[in-house]
């Protein structure tokens, strides 16, 4: 029998490229960019079509992902302010392009969804399928407290593997991985130099 991956540090699935600590040297610039975005478009806990409120707080740069009673969609405008989402900062675009290139993709994102997990926040198993072009990968960047990320298959009922994502880890999700079910287990409290929370940036080609 295969040994369970207790440390979550090895993970091999078709279409998944894990770049450990790839973003670590940019962390200060990334957090400053997040702060600047959040000053214009504050983090908010969105409502899902079923009427519940997400535990993860979100904001966006570039093309933004939103949910409300009407459903999930991408939009150029922040529904809270009625203004365009802040532009994608160059430090975001550059990082996403370099990470995607490591995985063999020529990728330029048009949007970034920024997730803020306070302790207790989680994200249930879901697929990302509001994007127009599934040949483009999604690039994810983790900052702050570690998360237990769950990666399944093409059916909700498929078994999931747990991958621990640490500060600075970047993952490129393309090809067969792009439509896989995934989620994040409840964030445990802890201490980190950037604060007692976790950010996840997901770079997308939404339109
Ligand atoms: C695999 N975010 O924003 S990042 C999301 O940690 C989302 O906040 C999680 O799932 C987070 O939609 C996970 C890793 C990730 C992101 C998008 C994916 C994995 C993915 C899309 C397709 C397949
Ligand atoms: Fe997702």
Image: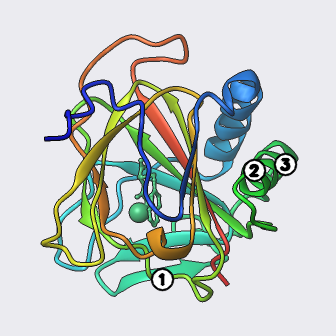
Q: Out of 20 and 2, give the one closest to the viewer.
A: 2
Q: Quadrant of the C terminus?
A: bottom right
Q: Measure the C-alpha gap from mark 3 to mark 2.
A: 13 Å
The residue depicted at 56 percent of the width and 34 percent of the height is: 169
**Residue to which mark 3 is pinned:** 94
- Nearer the N terminus, badge 1 or badge 3? 3
Instruction: Please tell me in which quadrant of the rendered image residue 155 appears.
Output: bottom left
**Alpha-carbon neighbours of circle 2 within 10 Å: few (<14), some, or many (≥20)?**
few
39 to 50, vertically: above or below? above
- Nearer the N terminus, badge 3 or badge 2? 3
Taking 186 as reference, is 179 left or right?
Answer: right
The residue depicted at 49 percent of the width and 37 percent of the height is: 199
Q: Position of residue 78 (x, y in %)?
A: 59, 68
**Alpha-carbon neighbours of circle 1 within 10 Å: few (<14), some, or many (≥20)?**
few
Figure quadrant, ligand 1: bottom left
Q: Measure the C-alpha gap from mark 1 to mark 3.
A: 24 Å
């Amino acid at each position: 029998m295969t040994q369970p991956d207790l440390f979550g540090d090895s993970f091999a699935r078709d279409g998944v490229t894990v770049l450990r600590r790839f973003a670590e040297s940019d962390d200060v610039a990334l957090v400053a960019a997040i702060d600047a975005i959040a000053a214009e478009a504050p983090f908010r806990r969105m409502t899902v079509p079923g009427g519940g409120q997400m535990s993860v707080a979100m904001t966006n740069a570039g093309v933004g992902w939103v949910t409300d009673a009407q459903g999930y969609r991408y939009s150029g405008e922040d529904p809270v302010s009625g203004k365009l989402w802040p532009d994608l900062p160059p430090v975001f675009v550059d990082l996403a392009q370099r990470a995607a290139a490591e995985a063999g993709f020529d990728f330029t994102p048009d949007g970034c969804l920024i997730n803020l997990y306070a302790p207790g926040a989680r994200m249930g198993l879901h697929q990302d399928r509001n994007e127009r072009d599934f040949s483009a990968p999604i690039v994810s960047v983790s900052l702050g407290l570690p998360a237990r990320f769950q990666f399944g298959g093409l059916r909700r009922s498929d078994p999931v593997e747990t991958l621990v994502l640490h500060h600075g880890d970047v993952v490129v999700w393309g090809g067969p991985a792009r439509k896989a079910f995934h989620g994040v287990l409840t964030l445990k409290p802890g201490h980190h130099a950037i604060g007692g929370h976790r950010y996840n940036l997901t770079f997308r080609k939404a339109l």
